[in-house]
Amino acid sequence: MLGSSGFRASWQTGITEVMEEVGDPVRLDLTSGGTIPGLALAAGINRHWRRIGNAGAPSHKVLRPLERPSWFENKNLDLAGLYDMHEMEKWLASWLAWAGVTTFRDLRYRPGELKPDKVAHRAGIGVAMWRTKEPYPTRCTDEQLKDPTFIRRAFRWAFFGRQFPWRRLKAVWVPDTIGDHLPWLKDEIEDHSPAFWARISMSLWPVCQLTVLQDPRTLHLVFLGDGGLIDNQPSLFNDGRLHPFPLLNPRLMQHKRQGTERQARTDARRLPFGAVVRFETTTATDVQLLTGPELTWERRDAMWRQGVEQGRERLPTVIAELTRRHAALTERYAESSVRLPVEKPVLHPFQALAVAGRPGTRASFGFWS
């Protein structure tokens, strides 16, 4: 499970190299920056090319302001973003195409490969979806839905109309659960580009421009953004049930508190049948969101080396223990349908609003389950 990393995907690239050394990942659940190394691994790009490819990510083009914002909107981050991730999508698409992956169809398991039940693809991408409460007054054209000026206007219509689309935040797994939320895409999702959905999953609102779709039947607008808005511990299988394979979520610590016993207990509640492994942030990996354009090839390579070193130091022991524990749990719960509560972090007040009324959840201070 590779979650958000900002511009530290090079560190995750090093971590995935060690994961590959210890045991081949069966399924990769990805959000935000984790889509870069995760899709490369799922596509079969070897570790040497992953290292080289990620070091050349066009971060200097990512935080380039969108064209045509009005003078009033130029610094209004609450109106659907300033920056554009399309250059990152083009870059990732070219690497995936070089490896023979242009659509989700190319990420399907091959006959005979190990795979979880009811899952067809080696990788899934988490995206946050916000559907408006009311239909849009008119049917939008494809050109409008790609126009930054129109997107700002549509977002403002929802915002000032007190529809607050983020109150209905939902996690969409592409391509796994897209038919449950966006049924008109169900039959065509196999032909979609993983790089397109990776770009959406990396577009952090309110900094980056959102992607907007319109339900052709109801005319409701659907805003799609960074999957990390829902949960930075992504997993389609993290639903409180024992899954067929152990879940592993390697993460960089964002602050000192995340290295405490209290955080370890919290992580255990948030991933009851898996393991969250938090690695210390060092000088090499201390990269903030807005420093991306300053990352040189050497700095990215230093992050990669840090990921390999930290991974080799800890992951073999962690994965061995996780595998033993998963085997014991499988034996213990073999005849039962146990389902444990899963604590989900609330990273933003809007998320607390979003989950408070969701069926099957229990809200409390700081988290919901």
Image (tube, helix red, strand yellow):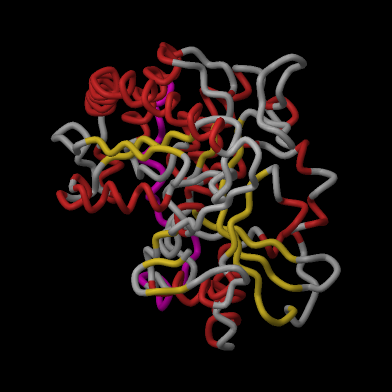
Front in this rendered view, residue 368 or 333 = 333
Q: Magenta region: which residues?
A: 53-75
Front in this rendered view, residue 190 or 121 = 121
Q: Does the stretch in magenta take in 61?
A: yes
Residue 66 appearing in the image = no
Does residue 298 lie above or below 71 as drawn?
Answer: above
Q: How many marks?
A: 0
Residue 147 appearing in the image = yes
Say whether residue 145 is left or right of residue 315: right
Say whether residue 241 is left or right of residue 116: left
Q: Residue at x 83, y 65 (%)?
A: 216
Does residue 227 lie above or below 242 as drawn?
Answer: below
Q: Does the stretch in magenta take in 285?
A: no
Does residue 235 lie above or below 313 as drawn?
Answer: below
Front in this rendered view, residue 84 or 53 = 53
Front in this rendered view, residue 61 or 78 = 78
Where in the figure is residue 122, as x and y percent of width and height?
63, 28
Say whether residue 137 is left or right of residue 279: right
Where in the figure is residue 125, as x and y percent of width and height?
58, 42
Q: Residue at x 41, y 78 (%)?
A: 72
Q: Residue at x 75, y 59 (%)?
A: 142
Where in the figure is residue 139, as x and y percent of width and height?
80, 72
Does residue 21 lie above or below 249 as drawn?
Answer: above
Quadrant position of residue 306: top left
- Prevailing SS of the magenta stretch: loop
Quadrant position of residue 13: top left
Say whether residue 139 is left or right of residue 54: right
Where in the figure is residue 365, as x and y percent of width and height?
35, 74
